[in-house]
Image: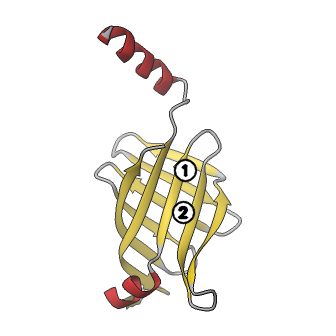
Amino acid sequence: MKKILTATILLTLANGLFAATYRCEPELQSIFGDRVQNNDFIRNFKPYTIVFDEKNPKIERCSFSPSQNRITCDTYDVDRVELDSNVNIKKYYVFRSQFDVQIFKEMSYIENNGRGGFQIGKCKLVLP
Protein backbone atom coordinates (compact mmCIF):
# COMPACT_ATOMS: atom_id res chain seq x y z
CA MET A 1 0.00 0.00 0.00
CA LYS A 2 2.85 2.39 0.88
CA LYS A 3 4.49 1.79 -2.53
CA ILE A 4 1.23 2.57 -4.33
CA LEU A 5 0.83 5.83 -2.40
CA THR A 6 4.43 6.85 -3.13
CA ALA A 7 4.02 6.03 -6.83
CA THR A 8 0.79 8.03 -6.99
CA ILE A 9 2.45 11.07 -5.42
CA LEU A 10 5.43 10.86 -7.79
CA LEU A 11 3.18 10.58 -10.85
CA THR A 12 1.11 13.53 -9.69
CA LEU A 13 4.25 15.63 -9.26
CA ALA A 14 5.65 14.50 -12.61
CA ASN A 15 2.44 15.41 -14.40
CA GLY A 16 2.38 18.90 -12.90
CA LEU A 17 -0.98 18.35 -11.23
CA PHE A 18 0.37 19.21 -7.80
CA ALA A 19 -0.17 22.90 -7.10
CA ALA A 20 1.72 24.73 -4.39
CA THR A 21 0.79 28.04 -2.83
CA TYR A 22 3.35 30.24 -1.07
CA ARG A 23 2.64 33.16 1.24
CA CYS A 24 5.63 35.49 1.33
CA GLU A 25 6.01 38.22 3.95
CA PRO A 26 8.72 40.90 3.80
CA GLU A 27 11.27 41.56 6.51
CA LEU A 28 12.81 44.46 4.57
CA GLN A 29 11.50 46.76 1.87
CA SER A 30 13.39 49.27 -0.28
CA ILE A 31 11.84 51.93 -2.46
CA PHE A 32 13.81 53.35 -5.41
CA GLY A 33 16.88 51.36 -4.45
CA ASP A 34 18.12 53.44 -1.56
CA ARG A 35 15.30 54.29 0.84
CA VAL A 36 14.74 51.31 3.11
CA GLN A 37 11.45 51.21 4.93
CA ASN A 38 11.61 50.41 8.62
CA ASN A 39 9.71 47.65 10.36
CA ASP A 40 6.96 50.11 11.34
CA PHE A 41 6.04 50.47 7.67
CA ILE A 42 5.82 46.70 7.26
CA ARG A 43 3.80 46.35 10.50
CA ASN A 44 1.42 49.18 9.56
CA PHE A 45 0.72 48.23 5.95
CA LYS A 46 1.17 44.45 6.37
CA PRO A 47 2.29 43.77 2.78
CA TYR A 48 2.50 40.18 1.60
CA THR A 49 2.64 38.26 -1.65
CA ILE A 50 0.92 34.98 -2.46
CA VAL A 51 2.32 32.86 -5.29
CA PHE A 52 -0.04 30.27 -6.76
CA ASP A 53 2.36 27.83 -8.44
CA GLU A 54 0.00 25.82 -10.62
CA LYS A 55 -0.61 25.12 -14.31
CA ASN A 56 -1.55 28.78 -14.89
CA PRO A 57 0.41 30.52 -12.11
CA LYS A 58 -0.80 33.73 -10.50
CA ILE A 59 0.61 36.20 -8.01
CA GLU A 60 -1.47 38.13 -5.52
CA ARG A 61 0.05 41.25 -3.92
CA CYS A 62 -1.68 42.52 -0.81
CA SER A 63 -1.30 45.36 1.68
CA PHE A 64 -3.33 47.57 3.99
CA SER A 65 -5.23 50.34 2.22
CA PRO A 66 -5.81 53.32 4.57
CA SER A 67 -8.54 54.72 2.29
CA GLN A 68 -10.52 51.45 2.49
CA ASN A 69 -9.39 50.67 6.06
CA ARG A 70 -8.67 47.03 5.15
CA ILE A 71 -6.18 44.81 3.36
CA THR A 72 -6.71 44.79 -0.40
CA CYS A 73 -5.11 42.55 -3.03
CA ASP A 74 -4.34 42.73 -6.73
CA THR A 75 -4.01 39.50 -8.73
CA TYR A 76 -1.69 39.08 -11.71
CA ASP A 77 -1.25 36.32 -14.28
CA VAL A 78 2.35 35.12 -14.41
CA ASP A 79 3.79 35.44 -17.91
CA ARG A 80 6.86 33.27 -17.47
CA VAL A 81 8.33 30.88 -14.89
CA GLU A 82 12.00 29.95 -14.82
CA LEU A 83 13.60 27.27 -12.68
CA ASP A 84 17.33 27.29 -12.06
CA SER A 85 17.95 23.75 -10.87
CA ASN A 86 21.64 24.51 -10.19
CA VAL A 87 20.79 26.76 -7.25
CA ASN A 88 17.11 25.84 -6.74
CA ILE A 89 15.55 29.23 -7.47
CA LYS A 90 12.15 29.58 -9.07
CA LYS A 91 11.42 32.94 -10.64
CA TYR A 92 7.97 34.21 -11.65
CA TYR A 93 7.76 37.10 -14.15
CA VAL A 94 4.81 39.45 -14.63
CA PHE A 95 5.72 41.52 -17.70
CA ARG A 96 2.66 43.78 -17.82
CA SER A 97 3.34 45.14 -14.34
CA GLN A 98 7.14 44.85 -14.63
CA PHE A 99 7.85 42.81 -11.51
CA ASP A 100 9.15 39.40 -10.57
CA VAL A 101 9.24 37.15 -7.53
CA GLN A 102 12.09 34.73 -6.81
CA ILE A 103 11.65 31.92 -4.28
CA PHE A 104 14.79 30.17 -3.03
CA LYS A 105 15.09 26.61 -1.73
CA GLU A 106 15.33 27.74 1.91
CA MET A 107 12.02 29.62 1.37
CA SER A 108 13.47 33.12 1.34
CA TYR A 109 12.22 35.39 -1.42
CA ILE A 110 12.92 38.60 -3.29
CA GLU A 111 10.20 40.60 -4.99
CA ASN A 112 11.57 43.11 -7.50
CA ASN A 113 8.95 45.67 -8.45
CA GLY A 114 10.87 46.65 -11.59
CA ARG A 115 10.92 50.31 -10.68
CA GLY A 116 13.84 50.40 -8.25
CA GLY A 117 12.15 48.83 -5.25
CA PHE A 118 12.22 45.40 -3.72
CA GLN A 119 11.06 43.30 -0.77
CA ILE A 120 13.07 40.58 0.94
CA GLY A 121 11.60 38.07 3.36
CA LYS A 122 10.44 34.52 3.96
CA CYS A 123 7.77 32.35 2.37
CA LYS A 124 5.64 29.65 3.90
CA LEU A 125 4.10 26.80 2.00
CA VAL A 126 0.32 27.04 2.25
CA LEU A 127 -1.40 23.72 1.68
CA PRO A 128 -4.37 23.82 -0.70
Residue most extreme to the front: 69
Work out whether mark 1 precedes mark 2 in sequence or the reverse, and give the earlier one.
1
- Which x, y percent locates residue 89? 40, 49
Residue drawn at the location 49% of the way across and 80% of the way down: 117
Residue type pointed to by label 1:
Phe
Residue 95 appears in view: yes
Q: Which residue is drawn at 48% across and 49% down?
A: 21
Marks 1 and 2, how far apart at CA: 14 Å
Image coordinates for residue 105, horizontal then vertical, percent = 32, 48
* Identity of the residue drawn at 46% across and 84% down: 45
The residue where tag 2 is placed is 100
Within 10 Å of disc 2 (Cα), the crowding (few <14, some 14-19, many 20+) is: many
* Residue placed most toward the observer, 32 or 3: 3
Q: In this view, does 41 lie to the left or right of 64?
A: left
Please tell me the numbered disc located at residue 52. Answer: 1
Label 2, secondary structure: give it.
Answer: strand
Q: Where is residue 67 in the image (x, y as percent from the top left)?
A: 63, 91
Q: What element carries label 1?
A: strand
